[in-house]
Image: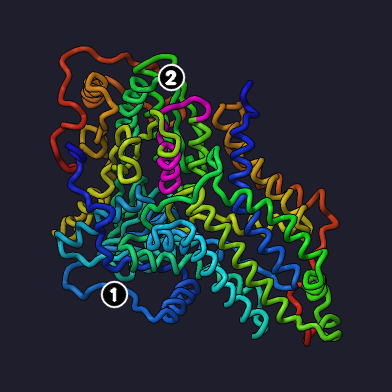
Amino acid sequence: MDDFFTISLLVATLRTATPLIFAALGGLLSERSGVVNIGLEGLMLVGAFMAATGAHYAGDPFVGLAIGVGAATLAAVIHAVWCITLRGDQVVAGTAINLLGLSIPAFLTQRLFDTAGRTPTIDRLPTIGRGLNVLVPVAFLLVPIVWYLLFRTKPGLRVMAAGEDPRATESVGINVARYRYACVLASGALAGLGGAVLSIGDLSFYTSNMTQGRGFIALAAVIFGNWSPLGTLAATLLFGGAQAIQIQAQTTGLPISTDVLIALPYVLTLIAITGLFRNSLPPAGLGRHPTTG
Amino acid sequence: MSDANTTPQVPATNRSPIGATTRRTVLKGAAAAAALATLGVKLPRAAAQDGPTVIIVTDTAGLGDQNFNDLANAGLQRAGAELGVTTDVLESQDAADYEVNLQEAADRADLTVAVGFLLTDAVNATAPQFPDRSFLLIDDVAEQENVQSVTFKEHEAAFLAGVVAALTTKTNSVGVVGGQEIPPVVRYEVGFTAGVQSAKSGVNVAVVYAESFGDPALGKELTLAQYNNGADIVFPVAGATGIGSFEAAVELGGGRYVIAADTDQSQLGADVQLCVVNKGVDVAVFDGAQQVVEGNFEAGARALGLAENGVDLTDPGDNVAPEVLEVAARYKAAIIAGDIVVPFDRDTAAAFQPVPAPEGTPGASPAASPAATPSS
């Protein structure tokens, strides 16, 4: 028990939170512009898979990273066209993205590598020490950047206007669709980064469905964080911290039921959403189109 | 010397892609098909053959876990190559897929193989609907007239791994990373722990569970925590989650080892793999296919342990001392003779008293045990 709270607990928290931060910032941008994005999980999977595949063929994890982010952005184009241009149901579109994220890698691993459900082992992104990869500080730096862009720049304020009242925004001559496209594509890139953290940052391969629901936890973090970058960061750290604590508690053999410990991060998230942040309100124009109100 | 108890496995990198498509629910299948059509590629199609069709349905960890499901697939591919049966694999992405996949498989296949304990309920629901079809359930018993149930006494071989771990650890601390707390995993866990306690007193066994067979990132975190807390040998029984254990050991290095469950995983780190607790899932699948081909498939339950060569300790690396293997061999002989009853669940584990190493002339070392296939 003496060494329960060690530096490794902090490091584990940061490592666990990093993919969540990327994906949650992506979800935040998309939702702030008024487009529901439950496809984060699928976008993460596309990013994770293509990053590992790119790293394998290029022999360089940074090239893989670019390919992963690019591929996830491309997948987000589907979501954007469906939701913004075609005005399709945004939840259905997100579900389709999630299914694509499961199916495409399953198929392509078989085609490309002759092995089902995984890529070969690749060279990982470099670390900055203590097992933290280079993307960890990037994730934390992105939080104030996203905050600044959204709340302190003209395009950012227009994004939020599009999310709050798309009709009024359109009426003053702002192209709502353009801002929404930008945000949905950015959410693809960010979720792709979150997936790449797993496959070429923490680990050195892609394996089928390796995100294991992290995209949905990121979405919960956006809600828990009340659609604010700092609140979202706090939510991802809460989840990462709870995860790290339950791992440490299991490892050191605390006399608590394993089931309770494993449920801890999820229960904390649930309590936080329902209890503490009762005033959590989504953007008023979420899911609405400029012309149909 | 490796895999002495099992027939040669198809190397992971050389696995035939015959018909290993992914199918899930109708909706998901349609989405996938649409995606594939977009890419302008064709689904691999099972070749039309006269022989029987064998389809395996994976659990949620799916193909690529380099473990349990891949092992079943290795047996299937061998059956395809050697027996000429038509093969296919249906992967399950979540628990809701089990029944759907089993039904689709039974619709087309003479033998449907349900890979894992998690599919038991679905087998019990599906098998009565297809009385003319044969089913093979791995890791649990389904008492249906057309189901052959094969379980393994993982605890017996895991006991030997525990002996090796206890006599090899330099920090007197070892760990287990479980996938989900289901009977086959618990058998591994309590057998391993009993082996550690028997071979050397005062060795700590830290047991953690991931509650997932498909989360290698979490598996790595759990394993790093074990190593950081002083363990130097970790035994993952966790499917794809366990790949993370190998990554952790490779990353930290410095005399930290992993014991592989189910199958040789040296491709993930030959230097860190201490030994393997081999489980003849591939042999069970191949045997089932062979019985269907020969027309002598029988429903009922089989439990395969050390005595039946269904499980064994194999592939000891250079980091296991020969004396340690001698001790393990003596334990093995005692277990086969029935002198040691290895615990297999929480109750028997609680009642278990550590057994000191048996005396006498050691038998063949575990790795050198005669090759044989499980007998029915």
Which residue is tagged 1? B45
User: Can residue A261 be seen at all in this image of the molecule?
Assistant: no
User: Can residue B347 be seen at all in this image of the molecule?
Assistant: yes
Chain on which label 1 sits: B
Residue B338, x across and y down, in percent: 25, 23
Which colour assignment does the render follow? rainbow
Q: Is residue A30 magenta?
A: no
Pick whichever of labels 1 and 2 is earlier in the sequence: 1
Tell me if residue A174 comes above or below residue A61 in the rendering: below
Left or right of B167: which side holds A187?
right
Kindly identify the amino acid type of the residue bearing the numbered disc 2.
Asn
* Element at label 1: loop
For the N terminus of chain A, which image quadrant? top right
Left or right of B214: which side holds B291?
left
Tell me if residue B225 comes above or below residue A237 in the rendering: above
Residue B172: mark in rendering: 2
Residue at x-position 27% and y-position 55%: B13
Q: Report, in whole angstroms, how far the alpha carbon at label 1 lies from the one at label 2.
A: 53 Å
Left or right of A255: which side holds A291?
right
Q: Is residue B244 magenta?
A: yes
Tell me if residue A165 comes above or below residue A194 in the rendering: below
Occupied quadrant, residue A207: bottom left
The magenta-colored residue range is B228-249
Occupied quadrant, residue B43: bottom left
